[in-house]
Amino acid sequence: MTEKDIQDGKKIAELFAILSEENKNMAMVYLSALRDKELADSSKDNLQQKSLENQNLNTLKNHQHKKEKIKKKNKTQEQLIKKFLMEFNLSKNLFDVVNDWIEYKKEGGFIYKETGLKNLIRQIAECADKYGDKAVAAVIKESIASGYQGIVFDKLKKIKREASHVNSFNNFLQREYDYNKLEQKLLRNNGL
């Protein structure tokens, strides 16, 4: 109790001393009604407070449940990615670029399911066999940088055509040789 409460109590006692018995009873009934109203209002406020707390708790639980569900999906997807990347034997560089692509798609709200992920990695592996890791990685990076929804594999055909340029002397496609292999072949054939 504070000093002010004590002073207020003394004033009320002095007022009660002056009142007749009938007025004292009326004041008691009035004060009792005020106290009951305070308790009811307090109880009502407590119920509203508890209701708000329950709503907040439910919202928090739902949010945590969603986060756990997303975390579980991400973990499952990460396991699938590793499985398929190992299955199709991609190089470290291409492996990293494919992970970048999958992360890019997640940022846009798209999550690959198992079949789609397997087909994507299979297609990337086939293109890497045909056009080379560097060309495929470059196309994937360009697709990310351009904000494309998909990987533009058609650009690989264009890159391949540009790489195999026409010889202006005889209008034939210029051949590309691995001179180290040719040298080894010549040395073997000549018995050196």
Image: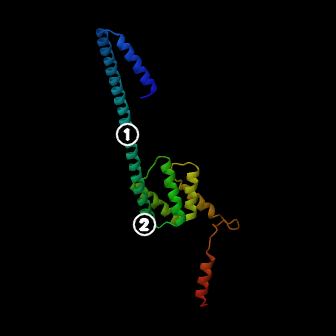
Foreground: disc 1 or disc 2: 1
Nearer-the-camera pick, 152 or 114: 114
Dot 2, how many residues are within 10 Å of its Cα: few (below 14), some (14-19), or many (20+)? Answer: few
The outermost residue toward the right is: 169
> Which residue is painted at 43% across and 56% down in the image?
117
Indicate the quadrant where residue 1 lies.
top left
Q: Is residue 161 left or right of residue 106?
A: right
Dot 1, how many residues are within 10 Å of its Cα: few (below 14), some (14-19), or many (20+)? Answer: few
Q: Amino acid at mark 1?
A: Leu
Find residue 74 and report its horizontal and vertical position in percent: 42, 54
Find residue 22 and report its horizontal and vertical position in percent: 28, 9
Q: Amino acid at mark 2?
A: Glu
Find residue 113 and report its horizontal and vertical position in percent: 40, 53
> Which residue is painted at 49% across and 50% down in the image?
105
Indicate the quadrant where residue 179 lies.
bottom right
Which mark identifies residue 87?
A: 2
Secondary structure under tag 2 reads: helix
Residue 65 in view, yes or no: yes
Marks 1 and 2, how far apart in space? 45 Å
Q: Is residue 179 left or right of residue 1?
A: right
Q: Earlier in the sequence, mark 1 or mark 2?
A: 1
Picture layout, residue 100 above or below residue 91: above
> Which residue is painted at 62% across and 82% down in the image?
183
Indicate the quadrant where residue 75 lies.
bottom left
Which residue was labeled with disc 1? 57
Nearer-the-camera pick, 52 or 190: 52
